[in-house]
Image (spheres, coloured by chain):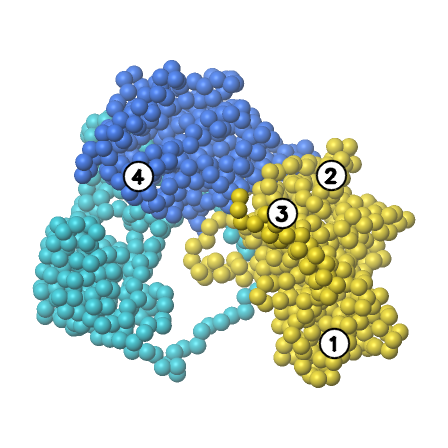
Chain colours: A blue, B yellow, C cyan
Amino acid sequence: MKEPLIRRMKDLPSTHLLGAGTAMCAGCGGLGALHQVHDVLGAKAVFVNAAGCMTLLTTYPFTPFRGSWLYTSMASAPAGAQGVRDALDILLDKKRLLPADDLSAVVLTGDGAAYGMGLSATSAAIERGLDFLYLCYDNEGYGNTGQQSSGATPHSARTATSVGERGYPGTKKDLFAIWAAHNPAYVATVIGAEPLDLARKIETAASLRGPRLILALAPCPAGWDFDPAQLVEIGRLAVHTGIFPLKEFRDGKITHTLIPRTRLPVEEYLSKQGRFAHLFSPWRNDEAIAEIQAQVDRYWLNAT
Amino acid sequence: MPRALLTGNAAAAWGVRLAEADYVPAFPITPQTEIIETLARWFDGGEMSGRITMLESEHSMVTAAAAAAATGTRVFTATSSQGLLYAMEMLYAVPGWRVPFVLVNVSRGVATPITLEPDHNDVLAARDSGFLQIHCANCQEVLDSILIAYRIAEDPRVRLPAIVNMDGFYLSFTREPVEIPDPVAARRFLPPFAADAIEFRASRPISQAVAVLGSSQYSYFRYEAHLAAMQALTAYDEIAGAYAAEFGRHHPAVEAYRCDDAEFVFFMMGSFATKARDAVDRLREAGTKAGLVRPRLFRPFPVDTLRRLLLGKRGVAVIDQNISFGKGGVLYAELASALYGQTGAPVLTSFIGGLGGRDFPPEEFYEMARVTRRAADEGRAPEPRLLYTAGELREMRKLQAIALVERRELGDAP
Amino acid sequence: MKTASCILGDAFFAEGFEVQDAPRYGAERRGAPIFAFVRADRHAINERGVITRPDLVVVADETLVTVAAAGVLQGLSDRTVLLINSAEPAAVWRERLKLACPVVTLPASGDATERAALPHIGAICAGAAARLLGVISRASLETAIAAELAIHGANVVALNREHALAVFDALAPQAGMVAEGCAIAVTDQAPPQWIELSAETAEIAAPDIHAAATSVRVPTGLWRTLRPVIDYEHCNRCSWICSTFCPDSAIAVEADHTPRIDYDHCKGCLVCVSVCPPHAIRAVPEHAAVEEPCRAPS
């Protein structure tokens, strides 16, 4: 692989490809990740979208993309990417398309589609060896409809459909592991709060061929209940408490790209979000907090 | 060109091959699977150049088909019944993309109960989707209709995907004589796909199928898709005429058999309509002025042609091979609305049969004609009739006895 | 605004009116402008949808009035009462907007932006509206506030009630100035301008955008109630931090590493304020910022 372009913070782009003026919430963590990703990927992409918050990025006649866009449905964005990629390859083979006019297919979905309804289409696309990038902005719930619980909702979180004092009873599905089990070309977790890590991973992904899947944790002011100004702080805490590991899968191996030297206690992350307020007030739920801490501790014990 | 014996599925595959389709996203389902197997063989063997990709569901398959068409390739796909229903979200979504492709539906009854034999409930469930619909009565029509469908779908006035429907088993697995057009002539009739402005190219950014907020804006796009479908009426006539000029076979939007001086007309679609032709001949011999009107084009619905053919007739027996629970036959409602209030509108009788491939023996056609004559004489139509005989019910009771007897023998105790 | 419409709806209902109330979201996003409507009638209400001929319009955020896209003045007639949450006098607004209809301003003090962002602004609007309508009693207003806000606890209810009643009492001179509307007779209603739509080419008749980055025409800067302002004397010219972390691509960095905030689009999330290491960005209420143009380095 050639020497990466983005080595230091100062290599990060200073003007941005993704246009302003979108309908995403002020302080949207998904948008924060996407606008960084778009800069590295460039304009020669067609973003193939599944139903979710970002469907409203593009509402007639407004689009923020310098490249192209195709809205499909909630469950079938990877199939849409398959159709686009196959067609481009056919046109290239038949010399009906100049190589300069070729595009890369980028699936853009939220966690609702990625962890649930769209998982079958994703699985099949990887299995077929589709040459595409998949970017999932994970705000840990069905955000566009008001933050109902999804397969990505973490244990104990309050959502619109889990409002009891224990919060969400389920656990967060390990989508990274599910994707990696298919042995695709590349899988990585990223977050907008760590731009250098994100940029390097997107650069790596862009240099490879085959199925490449990126999972971006997208802290969500509306859904997680925090002041939008805290977006980057929440993201840093997700990483430095060890709750959101930054890692990549390649050639059968998993590498952690940022290992917190000393992991902060999970409650520093949890206490800053209204969706976990019931763990602290009216009384401290030590048991639940300890359970979350233990889960994180277990992960890092096995990982390193 | 000489004629060969081909099944409907083989004829469909030939239609796709002559159309030089670039891309076939596929998923198997009885009774269409032979089509995609044949195409796969031809792509592998080089008889066709392009690609066939197996998708993991029909919903994904239709998505991939439209996405590839939106990228600028000529696309074909096929399905039936449960598969068509599984794709239904996308069947409704993709006509609005205004990209053309052809989908062959091999019609098969829908669950519940699950079955394999044909009727029209599957394809008619898509009637509001925006897909054009052409219904075939024999294997020759299947091949011809695919070429015709591509040219209509790709016509700049239309730009909508099209379903070509053939009945499962009765056409899909039945061999009939079919003339395979010469490929050079086929290419003359159907030039290569021109995507015009709707395609993905790095040099020309485009956002397709975007969300639209606002009722007036949404209405505009929906009305335009409807108007485009209506344009297909004119386009169909022109293109079917061009096909006749090139290949000598004319498939007008509506088949009219011995209709001119008919007093009573059978009205039905699909392969069973050929049985009606025989019934017409026998009835004529017996002194009844019978005829047959068979729409090939169902969407758009050829209202003007049907009025021209049917106004002034005494009675029309509408034969539906489908059922809308709680209402009755779909074809009946469609025709009634086209003729209502028109001068000389005939009395309409409604018959529902053919479900799950249930046959129409000749005596049923004669009885339908008799009922329609009586209705015309009295100026009043009877209630719609579900076609079923005493003998069939007796057989059903025997099966029910078996299905129930075990429980009685074993009783409720574990 | 949803709270305001629910309180008003409840109050009307308590007074024996038939009621229909609903919120309407513009961009359905936190921070974007929203409005709500209330219909009240002595008989069953058959009409639906957005109100086209309002009898009373209540504006909580005055900065939206002059924004055509927000549609605040849509459907106003000479008899519509316009109530604006503003420190400026009503006469100034009538002159500025060239209005023939009556204008009333909410008698409150303090910064406009801050007032619009107050948690009890809904109750204030409902209280003011109730007084101007004249058909809602003090008691019904109190009951409505208690019912709608009970879920937030007794303290919140008390605070809202206090503010709403203060406004209700202060507007005594204008009590009942909103008159009930009446139905328009068939003959007075102009016919619709129906046209025959013609089929157009797929290129324009498909919901496709044949261009890049047209979103820049959407002034999401309107969402702000606070704006970030860069103090260029303390800015380190790090060249990347605020620009990278701004989710909306609203901060660009020039060749000499000077960051520029695009105020047409900045939504006021204030992430940049949080991340700037030397704290060279501060948050300023939008209303005050409009009056003092931000100084860029010469």
Residue A164 appears in the rendering: yes
User: How far apart are labels 3 and 2 at the CA level?
Assistant: 17 Å
SS label for mark 2: helix
User: How far apart are labels 2 and 4 at the CA level?
Assistant: 51 Å
Relative placement, left or right, of C209 versus A302 is right
Relative placement, left or right, of C60 versus A193 is left
* Residue that carries the numbered disc 4 in the rendered image: A167
Q: Say which of B211 and A179 sits in front.
A: A179
Q: In this view, does B285 lie above or below B99?
A: below
Q: What residue sits 13% from the left and 57% below the top?
A: C161
Q: What residue sits 76% from the left and 36% below the top?
A: B42
Q: On the image, which quarter does residue B241 sit in? A: bottom right
Q: On the image, which quarter does residue A97 sit in? A: top right
Residue flagged by tag 2: what amino acid is it?
Glu
User: How far apart are labels 3 and 1 at the CA level?
Assistant: 37 Å
Residue flagged by tag 4: what amino acid is it?
Gly
* Residue that carries the numbered disc 2 in the rendered image: B37
Contact between marks 3 and 4 (CB within 8 A): the answer is no
